[in-house]
Amino acid sequence: MPLLAALGYATLHTMTRRIGTTENATAMAFYIQVSFILVSGVAGIAFGNGQFETFDHPSMEFLFRAWVWPAGFDLALIALLGVTSALGGFSISNAYRRSEAAYVAPFEYAAMPLAVVWGLAVFGEWPDLFAWLGIALILASGLVLIWRETLANNRARVAPKRL
């Protein structure tokens, strides 16, 4: 599941970069939200009746449990989350459209410490060893990306111009 999420996220930003030259950020954010709705709608139809609720792992039980219609306050909260998600998608699309991914991606790493803080504050959970290893791997790959881009930019500036 995490591998599919990473693949989807990478595909999203690759497509954003590709269509960003012809589309504006509003259109791209709209496409992202429509994609989210379609994918989650298909998943809800396929798995929402609880027929796959036979897992022993708590995460899988949560994912594949039968869908229940949210109460009024919960529905309003979900709508608010949808609006903030749309604004976030708009902002990220605009950032990736206007700049190189190597410059934008490090700002997304701010989500790591925020996820730890919110996980502790809201759920009372502290990351285990594997979570810390994953966080370290993600941060290290981001630092390597920044380092390589810096080297490439320095070489491009220093390289003699061909006649």
Image (cartoon, rainbow, N blue to C red):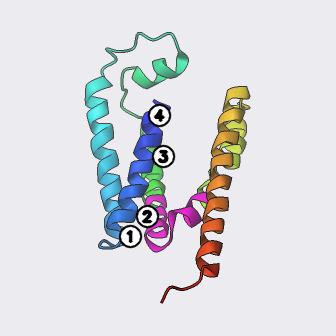
CA distance separating discs 3 and 1: 25 Å
Most foreground residue, 73 or 45: 45
Residue 119 in picture, x, y percent from top left? 67, 38
Q: Is residue 47 above or below residue 30?
A: above
Q: Which mark is residue 25?
A: 1
Q: Earlier in the sequence, mark 4 or mark 2?
A: 4
Foreground label between 4 and 2: 4
CA distance separating discs 2 and 1: 6 Å
Q: Earlier in the sequence, mark 3 or mark 2?
A: 3
Asked if disc 2 and disc 1 are in contact, CB closer than 8 Å, the reply is yes
Residue 74 in picture, x, y percent from top left? 46, 40
Q: Residues within 10 Å of mark 2 (few under 14, many from 20)?
A: many
Q: Is residue 162 above or below residue 20?
A: below
Q: Is residue 71 on the magenta stretch? A: no
Most foreground residue, 70 or 160: 160
Label 3 secondary element: helix
> For mark 3, what is the residue?
77
> What residue type is disc 3 on?
Leu
> What residue type is disc 2 on?
Ser
Left or right: residue 16 versus residue 49 is: right
Residue 78 in picture, x, y percent from top left? 44, 45
Q: Earlier in the sequence, mark 1 or mark 4?
A: 4
Left or right: residue 91 versus residue 139 is: left
Label 4 secondary element: helix
> For mark 2, what is the residue?
93
CA distance separating discs 1 and 4: 27 Å
Residue 20's image quarter? bottom left
Residue 123's image quarter? top right
> What residue type is disc 4 on?
Leu
Q: In the image, what residue occupies the spot 48% across and 90% down?
A: 163
Residue 94 in picture, x, y percent from top left? 45, 69
